[in-house]
Image (spheres, rainbow, N blue to C red):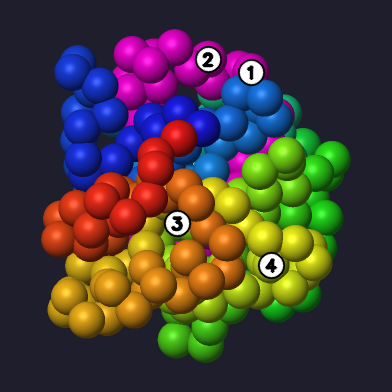
Amino acid sequence: MKIVFDNYEVCSSCQSLWGFSAYFPEYKLLFDTGSNGRVLLKNMQKTGVDVNEIEYLFISHSHWDHIGGIDSIIELNPDITLFAPASLSKYLLHDLKSMVKELVVCTKKPMQLFDNLYTTGLLGSEMPEQSLIIDAQMPEVVTGCGHYGIENITKVAKDFLGKDIVRVAGGFHLLRSDDAKIQQTIEQLKEMGVLYANATHCTGDKAMQLFSREFASF
C-alpha cells in the first residue's frame, strides 16, 4: 500500500490536505481519492504512481474528503472499473456510470471484487461505509474512515473470511475518543489476531501514538 493523499505527510515534496487515498500497485487499485483532485494527481506523480496504470477505483463512502478527486482520475483515465457504494447519490452514480468502463455498485452484502479482494459491504446506518478486504498471506482490512469502528469492521472481515485479520490500515475514526476507548479498541483487535496496524487520517494523534506502541507497522 502506497498512501498518496493524507492529512499527514505522504512525502517531503507532497502536499497534505484533509482526506485519504492509497494505491495498491500489485492490484492496480486506487482506494478513495482524497478531497482535491489536483493535489491527488500531483502527489501521485511525486510518489511514482501513473494515473494511466490504474485499473480499479474503490470508494469507501460518500464524504467529500474521500471522493473529491474522482473527476480528476476518470478524466485522465476513464478505462477503469469503479467500485462505488450504493450510498452515493443516485444522480452521481448515474453520471459516473457513463464516465467509466464499468460501474459496480456495492451494497450491504460482502462480495468478491476480483482475485483475492473483497468488500465488507456497507456497514453502519448513519454513514454507510465499505472497507476493503485483502485475502493475502497476511489477511488485511483497509478503511477510509472506519465510521463503523475498526474493531467491528475487522470482526465482519474475520467472520466473512473465516480466518484472522492480521493487518489493518487507514482511518480508524478515533479522533475524538478518549484513552479508555482507544485502549479498548486496541485490545479487541489484539484478541482477534491483529498484529500490524498503519493508522492515519482520522485516527487522531493520540490514537496513532498508542497504535504505534502496541502494533508493528507494515
Q: Is residue 60 magenta?
A: yes
Q: Which mark is residue 50?
A: 2
Lower sequence index among marks 4 and 2: 2
Q: Residue at x 19, y 16 (%)?
A: 13
Q: Nearer the viewer, mark 1 or mark 3?
A: 3
Can residue 74 be seen at all in this image of the molecule? Answer: no
Alpha carbons under labels 3 and 4: distance apart: 18 Å
Amino acid type at circle 4 is: Lys
Amino acid type at circle 2 is: Asp
Q: Which residue is labeled 3 in the image?
A: 144
**Residue 202 in the image, given as x and y percentages of width and height:** 27, 59
**Residue 20 in the image, given as x and y percentages of width and height:** 36, 46
Label 3 residue SS = loop
Alpha carbons under labels 1 and 3: distance apart: 22 Å
Lower sequence index among marks 3 and 2: 2
**Residue 194 in the image, given as x and y percentages of width and height:** 53, 58
Give the magenta-colored segment's residue range.
Answer: 40-66
